[in-house]
Amino acid sequence: MCRVGKAAIIGVLMLLTGCGAVRLAYNTAPQISWWWLDGYMDFSSTHSPRVKEGLEQWFNWHRQTQLTEYANWLALQEKRVTEPTTAAEVCALFDQGREKFQPAIDRAMLMASELLPTLGVAQIAHLEQQYAKKNAEFRDKNITASADARRKLRKKRAIESAERLYGKMQAEQLRVIDANLAASPYDPAEAMAARERRQRDILLTLRRWVAEKPDRGVLLASMRGLMERSEHPSDPALRAAQQRAIEFNCRASADLHNSTTPAQRLAARKKLRDWEDDLRALASERAP
């Protein structure tokens, strides 16, 4: 699947853990997703109704079939969040999360396979322009900015992410965050290069689809191949760097969790319960 489409889906799903008003966020997600996708693709008057209808259909399906599964999974995590953890357990949790989201991605690919062959050179050109714009913003914040500004930005993001689950970070957690940022293998220049490689692959693949108009089976196989290349690069050095990053992130997450207080872990359990309750309520509601 085109990374644009996958990112939109994952971005919407992340609303489930990144926004206090989960039910409001989810109910407005089809419109938000439309704005996001159209910003990248600048759909024509012919495409726009089809994309909007497809998003509505996907979210209706998602509400009816997936939200209860997510709620059940969160219920299991509520029982574990007050206990210490290990890097291996965190990695296993991330893998479970990806597995839970995979049906949603598969469904989106199936629906997108009807639209993608109808895109034209104008949409692809607009996507290329948006990539260039976003890449410039990434460079400004993550590469050309001063080392101090980059460090502060990364710390700010890490704190905001942690506080969505545990509440206010205290001195011990801030120390752990600082130590993990200092030890991180993250290289913004390397991330930029990987980002541009993915974008070139997406643009080349989209242009091939537009030119060749493959049948649905061939297109779906090509979409899965694009996703596989994006998530699992063929270059051994890139794969090794990716694995190092995954292992580091698991260790960093475990270190932070183990540094939290009993009160913070109880707050995390309550937050997970609140999200679970919101998901069950959404699953039982009719789509607005």
Image (tube, grey):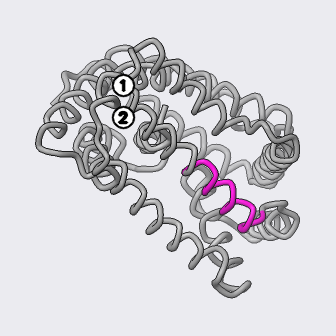
Query: From mark 1 to mark 2, how far is it between C-alphas?
Result: 6 Å
- For the residue labelled by badge 1, is the local secondary structure a helix, a strand or a loop? loop
- On the picture, is 274 further left or further right than 173? left
x, y percent for residue 108? 40, 25
Whether residue 78 is visible, yes or no, is no
x, y percent for residue 249? 78, 49
Q: Is residue 278 above or below residue 69?
A: below
Tell me if label 1 and label 2 are in contact, CB under 8 Å. yes
- For the residue labelled by badge 2, is the local secondary structure a helix, a strand or a loop? helix
| Residue 198 is covered by the magenta coloring | yes
Whether residue 12 is visible, yes or no, is yes
Q: Magenta segment, which residues?
A: 187-199
The main secondary structure of the magenta stretch is: helix
Which residue position holds label 2?
210
Please, what is the three-letter code of the amino acid marked with disc 1? Lys
Q: Is residue 17 above or below residue 39?
A: above
- On the picture, is 43 further left or further right than 242? left
- On the picture, is 239 further left or further right than 105? right
How many C-alpha atoms fall within 10 Å of the one at disc 2: few (<14), some, or many (≥20)?
some
x, y percent for residue 256? 77, 54
| Residue 109 is covered by the magenta coloring | no
Please, what is the three-letter code of the amino acid marked with disc 2? Val
Instruction: Place residue 188 in its image quadrant.
Output: bottom right
Which residue position holds label 1?
213
Q: Image point 24% across, 23% down: which residue? A: 57
- The quarter of the rendered structure image containing the C terminus is top left
**How many labels sit on residues?**
2
How many C-alpha atoms fall within 10 Å of the one at disc 1: few (<14), some, or many (≥20)?
some
Q: Is residue 62 above or below residue 246?
A: above
x, y percent for residue 68? 43, 18
